[in-house]
Image (tube, rainbow, N blue to C red):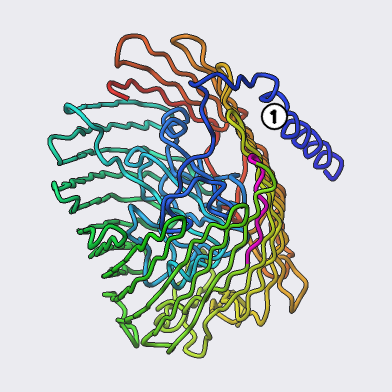
Amino acid sequence: MKIRTIRQWGVAALCLGSLPVAAQTQEDPNDSDALELNPVVVTATLAPRTADETLSSVTVIDEATLRRQDPTSLTEIFRGQPGVDVVSNGSFGKSSSVYIRGTNSDQNVLLIDGIRLRSATTGSAAYEYLDPRMFQRAEIVRGPKGSLYGADAMGGVIQLFTSEGEAGAPQPYISAGTGSFDTQRYSAGLSGSSGGTRYSFAGSRFNTDGTAIRRDGEEKDYDNTSAIVRVSHTFDSGAETGVLALRGRGSTEFDGGETDFVQQVAGVYGEISVTNTWRSRLTLSESKDEQDIYRTFGDSVFDTRTHTARWENTLNMGRHELIVGTEFMSDSISASDSYAEDSRDNFAVFAQGLFEFNPVSVQASLRHDDNEAFGEEVTGSLALGFALTDNHMLRASYGTAFRAPTFNDLYYPYDESTYRGTTFIYEGNPDIQPETSETYELGIRGQYQPYFWDMAIYQNNIDNLIAWGSESTGPSVQTYRPENVSEARIRGAELSAGAEFSEWTLAAALTYTDPEDRDTGKRLRRRASQSARFDIDRALGDWSLGGSWVVQNHRYEDAANRERIGGFGLINLRAGWEFAPQWSARLTVENALDKEYETARDYLNAGRAAFVSVHYGK
C-alpha cells in the first residue's frame, strides 16, 4: 500500500509539474482571446480584487466549470480542491461535512450572496441540501477570516453566488435529465435586465431512489425542490437596492429514519454613494435551517434562524481603501427537546485597510465581537505582499479567529436511544470553552495570461478545540459528549495550478495536511492527510470531453486512530454536445471505475453512476 501511494503521488507531482510547462509552450502574448486565469474575488477582502491581489489562498469555481462538470452535489466539486476535504454519510442528500485546511466543518463559514447559512444547533452548513444548478460561481478562501466574518471563520470561507441577471433581453434556460438510481433532474430559469433593473428567477427539482449507505442495506432516497428570486435596481444617482430569496425544500432517508428539511436565505440591501469617495451599504437578512427528523425510536424537530444586520462603509483614498462597519447577529432555535438557552446575540464592529505601496501591498483588519454568552473577543489579521516581478507575488500573513460553542455543544438535551442492540447517549457540556486560533501562512503565486500556479504553507494553532468524543459507559452503551482538546496543531502545504490554451482547460491541486491533537500526538478524526485532484477538458468543435481524477489517502474514524478508513481514487468522466444553436446535451459518469469507498465508518458512497441531460440556453 505504501509503495502504491508513493507511486501515485509521484505521477501526480509529475503531471502537476508539467502542466504550466505545457501551457507555456502554447502561450501567445498577442492572443487577446486567451483567458487570464486571475479572476476577480470579493470574499477574501470584502472588495473586488484579482486572485493575486487578495494576498490569500483562494480557489474560484466559475460558471463554465460548474456547467461542464454538472455535479449532482456541491460536495463532489469541492472534494479534492486545494485544502478542502469532504466527509459524507453516503451519497445524495446525506449528511456531509466540508473541512478546510483540517478544521471542522463548523469552523468554516458558508455564504450565499453574502448571507450566512448554517444551523445554530450544529454550527455547520448543510451543503448536501443545496442544488449546484442554483449557483453560478463559488469562491473558496482558505485561512482565518474571523476579523471580516466573525466567529466560525477559522479555517476559511466558502461563498456561493447566484445569477445577477445578464444585460439585455430576457434569457430563458431549461434543463432536463435522468440517470442511475432512477434519478431525475429538472431546472428552468429566466434572467435579464431592463433599464436599471436586473432580475433572475430559477427553479429546480431533483429526486432519486438513491443507493444503500450500509452494506446489504436498503436504498435511501432523496428529493429536493429549490427556487430563487433575485432582483436589483440601480438609480440614476448610482444608488442601488436589491432583494434575494433562495429556498430549498425536500426529504432524505437515512439509516433508521427520514429527514424533512428546509434551507432558506432571504435578504434586502441598499447601497448609496455618500460622497465621491465614500460608499455605504446596509444589508438585512435572515437564514433558516429547519429539519424534522423521523426515527423508529422517536421524532425530533430542530428549527434555527439567524437574523443579521450588516452595515459596510467603503472609503477610497486613491490607491488605498478603508472598509469599516458593524454587524448584529441574532440566533434562535425552536426544538422538540427543551434547550437550557434558545437564543443568543452577537454585536461586532470591524475595520479593514487595503494599502498599495508598489511593489508592497499591506492588508490589515481588526474586529471586536461582543457575544451575549461569552463576552468580548478581538480578532485581527495582517497580510503583506511583495511583487517580485509583474508575474510573481510573494505573500505572508498572520490571523486570529475564535468560535463560540454551538447550542448543541453547550445545551444539547440528554438523549438516549437504542439501535441494533446498542444504546446511544448524547448530551451537551455547559462547561465547554470557546475555541481560539492563530494562523501563519507563507505563499507565492505565479500569474500569466494563459496559466497560473500557487504554493502555500501554513500552521494553525487552535486552543480549546471542541470535539465530540464517545466512550463506552456500560455494556453496549456509547456516550457522546463534547470536550475541549487543549491544543491542536494543523500544518499543511498546498500546490495548485490551472491553464487554458488552445482547446484545453486544465486544473490541478496537491494538498498535504497534518492535523494533530497535541495532547495525544494522534491525527484529528476523519481527516485525510494527502489528496490530489486533476481536471482536464478538451473542446472538439461542437463536442467537449473531460474528466476528473481525485485521490485521497486513509483517515481515522476515532480520536485514538484505531479505526482506519482506507484511501481511494475516483475517476469522473463527462462529455458535451452542442447539437443546435442554444441546445446542448451532456453525459457525466461519476465514479467510473465503480470504486467502493467511504469517508465515514460504515457509510458507503455511491458506485458508478451515469447521468444524461438536455439543456436549452446554457
As drawn, 71 above or below 220: above
Looking at the picture, tell me which residue is in the foreground, 2 or 180: 2
**In the rendered image, which residue does mark 1 sit on?**
19
Left or right of 206: which side holds 416? Answer: right
Looking at the picture, tell me which residue is in the foreground, 213 or 597: 597
- The answer to whether residue 262 of the structure is visible from this angle is no
As drawn, 72 above or below 154: above
The three-letter amino acid code for the residue at tag 1 is: Leu
Look at 34% across and 80% down and name the residue there.
Answer: 347
Magenta part of the chain: 390-397
Looking at the picture, tell me which residue is in the foreground, 236 or 2: 236
SS at mark 1?
Answer: helix
Left or right of 411: which side holds 470? Answer: right
Asked if the stretch drawn in magenta spans residue 394, the answer is yes
Look at 32% across and 9% down and name the residue there.
Answer: 580
Q: Position of residue 408 (x, y in %)?
A: 43, 77
Look at 53% across and 53% down and name the residue there.
Answer: 54
Q: Main secondary structure of the magenta part?
A: strand
Q: Position of residue 354 (x, y in %)?
A: 49, 61
Q: Position of residue 159 (x, y in %)?
A: 42, 52
Asked if the stretch drawn in magenta spans residue 469, the answer is no
Split into 4 quadrants, where in the image is the C terminus? top left
